[in-house]
Amino acid sequence: MTQNSGAVDLVQELSQLAHDGKDLTLGQLTDAFGARGFGPLIFLPAMIEVTPLGGVPGLPSFIAFFIVLIAVQILTRRSGFWLPDMIRRRQIDEESAQKAVCAMRPVAERMDCLFGTRLRALTVGPIRQLAAVVVIALCLTVPALELIPFASSVPMLAIAVIGFALMVEDGVLMLVGLGMAVAALIVAPLMLI
């Protein structure tokens, strides 16, 4: 799969994996996502924190720790998300995988319509590593901000936009996310005063 393929192409590849007559392993799934798999792994946990679940004591810090682990893998320029072999071998039955693909297809089509590879250069190479550093810096503010109810959602929203930009390879969204990150890093210390 090429690095610049759209969300529909990614879903199509997952569909082929799901229809090969065998159960799908988590390792095959992460390999199919490749480096683009880092985006959803940053976006989804950050979005969970932005919901009312972000008010659960300890959850924002746990989510921030998980996101740091993902961002470090981006910094080390891994081509895909590392999972221990024990987890890579876990299987998803063929029927469940096919149902998931069917549910993802309309979402992927909509994403390809709304977001493209605008300014894609801002989602790869050194900018990708810069985004990872910014995400780590934002995550480091979360434990202190957790003392104020829902304050940790400010950096997490910026992290979610950066993760989404990586997922859809959209440089315009990356610029928005980095702008939000700068604002969050300025506002975070002020919230603690």
Image (cartoon, helix red, strand yellow):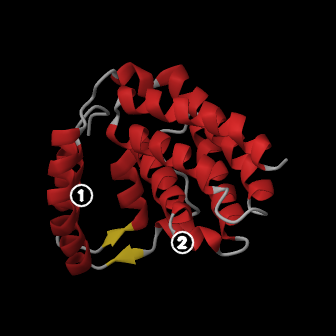
Residue 104, can we see it?
yes
For label 1, the residue is: 14
Residue 148 sits above or below residue 163 on the image: below
Q: Tell me the tag on residue 3.
A: none
Q: Position of residue 55 (x, y in %)?
A: 64, 71
Task: Place residue 152 in its image quadrant.
Answer: bottom right
Q: Amino acid at mark 1?
A: Leu
Task: Place residue 170 in its image quadrant.
Answer: top left
Q: Amino acid at mark 2?
A: Pro
Q: Position of residue 94 (x, y in %)?
A: 23, 76
Q: Position of residue 1 (x, y in %)?
A: 26, 40
Q: Residue at x 79, y 63 (%)?
A: 147
Residue 82 sits above or below residue 168 on the image: below
For label 2, the residue is: 52
Q: Residue at x 58, y 29 (%)?
A: 129
Q: Tell us which disc is closer to us: 2 or 1.
A: 2
